[in-house]
Image (spheres, rainbow, N blue to C red):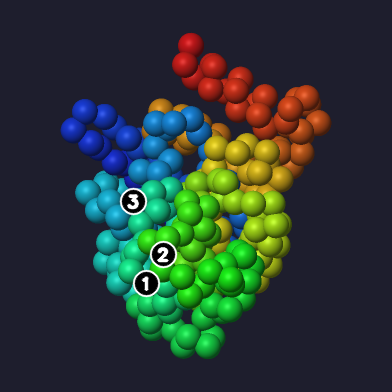
Amino acid sequence: MIELKEVSVQFPRVLAVDKISCVFKNGLIHGLIGPNGAGKSTLLKAMVGLISNYSGQVFYDSRLLSENRQAIKKQFGYAPEDIELIPYLSGLEYLQLVADIRKLDRDAAGLPHLLHLLGLEEVQQQMVDGYSHGMRQKLSLAAALVGFPAALILDEALNGLDTLALINVKKLLRELADQGHTIILSSHILELVEQWCDEIYIMLNGRLAEQLHQQQLTEISNKHEHGLSDYFQNLANRSSS
């Protein structure tokens, strides 16, 4: 479980995240949506410790992130929107390095399964420097999944994946959620979030505007012709007016 208490991130000229409090529960896939500039990526970076100058508190299973940063980092996988990989390693070597950093047994880290799942088997011995953008995106996602950590935080990490990879990842994420993992998925693809997620959080102007549970999502789907897309657009229009 990941709990946020009054989390805010202030940059010199903008309050990017404004006093967000919520709980991401074990066993659920949580969607995080909002327009560009809403503060989604900033919030997720604070949650994984990439931004340390935030106010408020972030807890992983009741342990405060700011006081247990190194231990907690071993328990979550993070796939960022901006992909940063080591170009002079092969795809397999990069995943092996991730496993080593997390102090995982390479044979138990699930590397062959992840390479197969994401369609990277045939290029696993190639240098990352020669990977296409799509291949790099898949490798970044595979790195987040190494060892199948207790919490997964995916920031636009599924955008652009091919259909087969999406099907495989959807199945895996559901299996992990059913096993009690905590999963947070940020995406601009509203249809994907609506179909995959058990709960959805909507961010607008740095704030948490809505938290939608499964029953509410079903009601929205029944009420609006385009489901979550219509609901989100109406909410964003009201917020900006």
Local SS, label 3:
helix
Q: Does any portion of residue 172 appear in the rendered image?
A: yes
Which circle's residue, 2 or 3, is located before the other in the chain?
Answer: 3
Which circle's residue, 2 or 1, is located before the other in the chain?
Answer: 1
The structure residue drawn at horizontal position 30% and vertical position 67%, both measured from the top left corner, is 69
The structure residue drawn at horizontal position 63% and vertical position 44%, both measured from the top left corner, is 193
- Separation of marks 3 and 1 at Cα, in angstroms: 28 Å
Q: Does any portion of residue 60 appear in the rendered image?
A: no
Q: Position of residue 205 (x, y in %)?
A: 41, 28
Which three-letter amino acid code belongs to the residue tagged 2? Val
Q: Please rate how many residues cluster around mark 2, counting C-alpha atoms within 10 Å: few if below 14, some from 14 to 19, many from 20.
A: many
Q: Is residue 152 left or right of residue 168?
A: left
According to the picture, the residue beneath numbered tag 1 turns out to be 89
- Separation of marks 2 and 3 at Cα, in angstroms: 28 Å
Labels 2 & 1 near each other (Cβ < 8 A) = yes
Q: Is residue 200 above or below residue 203?
A: below
Q: Position of residue 101 (x, y in %)?
A: 35, 78
According to the picture, the residue beneath numbered tag 3 turns out to be 46
Which circle's residue, 3 or 1, is located before the other in the chain?
Answer: 3
Along the line of sight, the residue nearer the viewer: 157 or 29: 157
Q: Is residue 40 left or right of residue 177?
A: left
- Separation of marks 2 and 1 at Cα, in angstroms: 6 Å
- Tell me where residue 168 sits by quadrant: bottom right
According to the picture, the residue beneath numbered tag 2 turns out to be 128
Q: Please rate how many residues cluster around mark 3, counting C-alpha atoms within 10 Å: few if below 14, some from 14 to 19, many from 20.
A: many
- Tell me where residue 76 sits by quadrant: bottom left
Which three-letter amino acid code belongs to the residue tagged 3? Ala
